[in-house]
Structures are given as C-alpha cells and as structure tokens.
Image (spheres, rainbow, N blue to C red):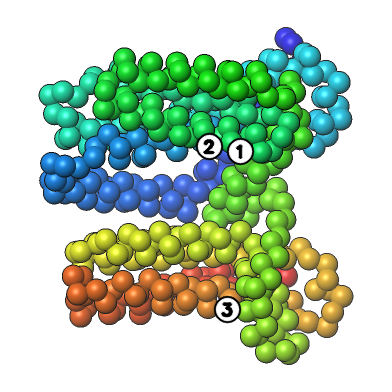
Amino acid sequence: MNPAAALWKNRLTAHLKIVSRYTAYAGQSGFFLFLLIVFIASSYFYGKALERIPETFPYAIVIALWLTPFIAVSPIRTLLREADLIFLLPMEARMGPYFRGAMLYSYLSQSFLLVVAFTASMPLYRHGYGENAQPFLALLLFALALKFANMLGAWTESAFVRTGHRVCFRICRFAADAVVLYALYRYEILAASIVLLAAIGAAAAWARLSRRIPVNWPYLRRKEAGHRLTMLLFFNGFIDVEELPSRVKPRRLLSGLAGLVPFRASNAFRYLYSLTLLRSELFGITMRITLLAVIILLFVESPVTFAVVYMLFQVMTNVQLSALGRFHRHSVWTALYPIPGTLRRPSAARIAFIAQLVQIAIMTLPLFRPAVFTIWLLALPLLGVSLAWIFRMRGIRAASGHSE
C-alpha cells in the first residue's frame, strides 16, 4: 500500500475512534433523546406552518437560502498535525492518495447533513409546486453533485497564496451556489446545469489567473486545528475531553465584569472562573443559544409551545455550562497559594448559576407579548432557576467524591 494511503487510513481510524467514543458519551447524556424531541416538535410545527403559507410565498428563494450553507460550507478534514509541516512536506509529490482520502471522507460525512437538510426542504417544495415538482431523486443527485463541486472549489480556494483571494473566492462560491439552487427550483435542472457549468468555468479561469501553490500546508493545518477544536468543544459539553487544547480570547470589555467580584482570598476561584467563562468558547456558545432561543420565542404564539421551547433551551444551556467546572482542575498554581482547593467546584458552580440567571432574565422578556402571555407562564423563570440550581448542585456532589 502507498505510504500516504496507509498514513491516511491510520489517521482516519484514530479519528473515528475518538468520535465514536465521545458520541457514546453524548448519547448517555440524553442528547439524542433531546434531538428526537426537537425533531418531533419541529415536524409538528413545520406541518402547521405549511398550512398558513400564502400563495405569494417565495418558495425557490427560501429553499435556495436554506440549502446554500449545507452545500457551500465544505471544510476538508485533512487530519494534519503540526509535525506534518516538517516531516510530510518533503514527500508532497507522493501525498495525492492522502489528500484524496481526506476529500472523500469530508464529502461523505458532509453529504449526510446535506441529505437531511434536503429532505427537510421537500415538503415545502412540494407544497409550493404541487404536480409541477421535480422528482426527489433527480434533485438530490443534482444537490450532491453541486456539493462535490464545492469540495473541489474549497480545495482550489486553499491553494491561493493571498488571504484576500481566498475570501473573495469563498464569497463568490456562496453566491454562485445560491443562484444555481434558485435556478434549480425555479427553472428546473437544465437551467441549473447551465448556470453551474458557467460558474465552474469562471472559477477555473479565476484559479488559473491567480497565484497558487500545489498544497498550502500552513493553511490546511490551521483549518484542521480549528475543525478539531470545534469538535472537541462540542463533546466537552457532555464529557471531560482530555485532548481539548486551551483557547483564550481577551475580550477586554467583557473581562471587566469579573471586577465585580469582591477582592477577597475566598473569592479567588470566583474571579478565575468569571474570567474563564467570559474569555472561553463557553461564553460564545451560551450567547448563541440565548440569541437563538429569543428569536424562536418571539415567533411562538402558543403558550404551551413557548413553555416547551423555553425549557428545552434551558436544559441545553445547563449542559453546556456544566463544562465550566472542568477548567483548571489540573492547574498547578492552586497548590502554590494558600487557597483551599475545596472552593474550586462551588465557585465554578456559582459563576455558572449567575450566568444562567442572566440568560433566564433575557429569555423571559418575550413572555410579555400579548399574543402569548398567560399567567401560568410566569412559573417558567422559577422553573428555570430551580433547574439551574439542580444542575449546579449535582455537579458539586459529583465532584465531592474526587480529590481536588
């Protein structure tokens, strides 16, 4: 077997072992049950929404915008490591099987999400076009072909030397995907094929006229490090991920909030975890969850639906903030200062609880819309606080049996 192909096989096997192990932990936490509940609820409200769509609804535009990210976002998982920039670079000419394996794996794994998104769009498409709707299989095969073209485009994009060229190429690729998908749903496959061929020709001419290198090793390594970090951060919400590298963002304006913690020795861990939350990816995850929850709650009109969505997002946030207590568990500096290690877990739990209270206050604001307000919904903030308290206390009790 070609050494490059054997290397890819070994790397992929090790990668899939990590993914399968942490996926099992995610399943044990009830994450897949949560996804099932979300799927059932979404299917119900999806069907209800279809009944209320007006005749002037822009079906082709909405479906194109929905599918464009699933097709245009085409990261290539190369599984490269830092040392590869030294040890694999000399054998670049023989690395073809390695990168072809990376392309194939990336295409197959991302095509699964595309199939799910594409299938989700079909009820809307058939509702809008009725008997004039094109066959499901023909549309799906075209979408998969367009996805493959984007994988090739992503590889071409990575070869550009200038960052500005990569950004412009990526923006144009997104725009071209949206136009091709609009042509597919508005004017059928023949017109979409013509637009796609024209886009491929323009991209080929652009690549030919731009400065490129065969393999942009530093860029591919940086992208792979980002993909790996995102994956590990996701799994870190369910289990302690040992491979997770540290990633700190200054966020100087937000970091000033940590100054609200009173300056006392007993508050040392509270100050530390305040900065940790504000500077780590947990803050971004919590903000995105809160923003998404508020947007959905603003469009909900049923009190029961409001309560279900409210509590689902509370559970999601609690699971994510549970990871805060895992930070600094192996820090050496705590043994160098006269600060009791027993304060670490309670301090992390307290900061997570305060963050949860802020989110509860924000998510409660859409409750006071006349279209949805019902007196019994005022119990939701109390339930949210109780749930947050239970999560925090459970984390402290779980850590009480382990040495600090």
Mark 1 vs 3, N-terminal side:
1
The residue at which mark 3 appears reads as 350
Asked which secondary structure carries label 2, the reply is helix
The residue at which mark 2 appears reads as 171
Name the residue located 59 percent from the left edge and 18 percent from the top edge: 205
Name the residue located 45 percent from the left edge and 18 percent from the top edge: 198
Q: CA distance from mark 1 to mark 3?
A: 42 Å
Residue type at numbered disc 2: Ile
The reply to whether dot 2 and dot 3 touch (C-beta < 8 Å) is no
| Quadrant of the rendering where the C terminus is positioned | bottom right
Residue with the most extreme front position:
209
Residue 245 on image: x %, y %: 72, 51
The residue at which mark 1 appears reads as 167
Answer above or below: position of 397 versus 125: below
Of badges 1 and 3, nearer the viewer stands 1
Left or right: residue 39 compared with residue 210? left
Residue 365 on image: x %, y %: 34, 75
Residue 222 on image: x %, y %: 71, 40
In the image, 311 versus 198, the foreground residue is: 198
Of badges 2 and 3, nearer the viewer stands 2
Q: Residues within 10 Å of mark 1 (few under 14, many from 20)?
A: few
Asked which secondary structure carries label 1, the reply is helix
Q: Is residue 54 visible?
A: yes
Name the residue located 53 percent from the left edge and 59 percent from the top edge: 285
Left or right: residue 284 compared with residue 305? right
The reply to whether dot 1 and dot 2 touch (C-beta < 8 Å) is yes
Residue type at numbered disc 3: Arg
Answer above or below: position of 134 versus 326: above
Q: CA distance from mark 2 to mark 3?
A: 43 Å
